[in-house]
Image: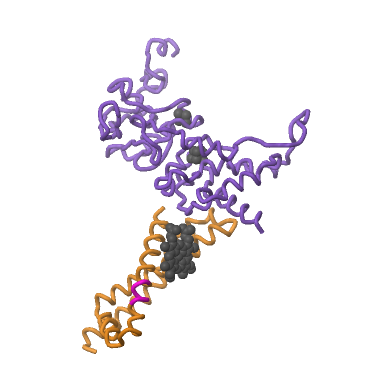
Chain colours: A purple, B orange
Amino acid sequence: MSAVEAELPEPASKIELPVHLGGGGEIPTFDVTLRVRRYDPEFSEESKWEDFTMTMYGTDRVLDALHKVKWEQDGSLSFRRSCAHGVCGSDAMRINGRNRLACKTLLKDLDTSKPITVEPIKGLPVEKDLIVDMEPFFQSFREVMPFLVNRDHAPTKERLQSAEERARFDDTTKCILCAACTSSCPVFWTDGQYFGPAAIVNAHRFIFDSRDDAGDMRLEILNDKEGVWRCRTTFNCTEACPRGIQVTQAIAEVKQAILARQI
Amino acid sequence: MWSWVGHRITGVVIFIFLLVHVLDTSLVRVSPEAYTAVIGAYKNPIMGLGEAALVAAIVFHAFNGLRIIAIDFWKKGPKYQRQMLWGVLALWAVTMIPFLIRHLTIVFSNFFGGN
Ligand code: HEM
Ligand code: SF4
Ligand code: FES
């Protein structure tokens, strides 16, 4: 098998295995059409839809289809991706009107009888095709101090914590900063100053960490007119999060912590 | 998201109604005759249907408002938000069906009955 792989420049998912190796084409193939929102400010200020049709396998994801377009049909198609396995958070995009990671969305789970629409995530300035300027997003992230603050003397070993204390913020440790949540929020679409769900999730990660001393400061930062009180509980963020984080729940817990602190 | 869109639309609808309602009621102090004429104009089936829509909006807004309060203040609120939304819709239907039967019979019998 390695000999076959060495000859072909194609990724493993594209190789048709011979029957005696368990291949034999039992992986179904189908034609899909990607309808991609194209934008290139060097040529036009207008963005437009462009269709690409190709044959894909039942094991392929939207990211594989984008790769196929870029490598075989139109090299100018631009999008971000790094890990291709749902851990780096680079490739959040709006697929069939929902924010998801292209690398975690199997084509066979979508309706392939119709064109699959692929657009950049909303609410952040588009730079080219599916690439948006993430700076406003990371700016809000930095403002909540997403790092451990502990004023005690540095211990010689780990800072100990019980299993229950660790479990308190376990859900919000899973964030990969993909921006699927923040860019699915109708409040963020109309008010780019809003901190957004991802920043609140990452504040939650430290506010409820027993080893951290800056929880009050973070609550103060988020007790702002552009902070947690902008949240209208639409649950779009919870539905968008590719890590299954209960985002709206985390925001509600931060709201309650701010109220509890003031009483 | 659609529960939120619905809540905002119904909120705005109720607000506009209240505004108009305060205006027409205050007419009574300006001119009781004009007041009677305006209130009389409400007694037609179009207005009857409008009233039905208004009640539908208020009932949804009220039940969903309670759901939002539960999401904000009940520990398990965010977890059960979807189930609560179905509950809101069920309560809405349970409230609206008897109301519509009674209300629309009155509205139309008054109109066609030439009352
Ligand atoms: C009858 C007059 C009422 C008017 C004019 C009204 C109007 C509104 C409006 C415009 C909103 C803003 C929606 C948004 O933030 O997206 C709102 C929100 C709200 N309303 Fe009402 N409402 C009324 C009655 C009620 C009742 C009877 C309840 C509860 C039983 C209620 C509970 C709420 C709650 C909890 C919110 C906050 C929603 C959120 O956080 O998004 N309202 N209302
Ligand atoms: S909370 Fe979820 S959707 Fe939001 S940035 Fe983190 S991983 Fe992405
Ligand atoms: S490419 Fe890394 S998350 Fe999809």
> Where residue A5 sits in the image (x, y, percent)?
41, 13
Please report the residue visible at 76 percent of the width from the left and 31 percent of the height from the top: A154
Q: Nearer the viewer, residue A251 or A27?
A: A251
Quarter of the image for residue A152 reads top right
Residue B45: x and y in percent read 25, 78
Secondary structure, magenta segment, majority class:
helix
- Quarter of the image where ligand 1 sits: bottom left
Residue A47 appears in the picture as rendered: yes
For residue A19, say whether it is visible: no
Q: Is residue A168 left or right of residue A11?
A: right
Q: How many marks?
A: 0
- Span shown in magenta: B19-23
Residue at image position (37%, 69%) is B56
Q: Residue at x 48, y 37 (%)?
A: A137
The answer to whether residue B73 is magenta is: no
Answer left or right for A204 relative to A188.
Answer: right
Question: What's the residue at 53%, 43% (across, down)?
Answer: A245
Q: Quadrant of residue A103?
A: top left
Where is A60 relative to B10, above or below? above
Work out which residue is located at the far bottom of the displayed protein and give it. B115
Is B21 covered by the magenta stretch? Answer: yes
Relative image position of residue B16 (x, y in whole percent): 35, 68
Q: Is residue A164 above or below residue B35?
A: above
Left or right side of A79 for A44: left
Residue farthest front in this picture: B30
Task: Compare residues A135 and A234 and report the one nearer the observer.
Answer: A135
Is A30 situated left or right of B65 in this image? left
From the image, which quarter does the C terminus of chain A lie in?
bottom right
Q: Image quadrant for the N terminus of chain A?
A: top left
Based on the displayed image, in which of its 4 quarters is residue A11 positioned?
A: top left
Q: Where is residue B46? Give x, y as percent.
A: 24, 75
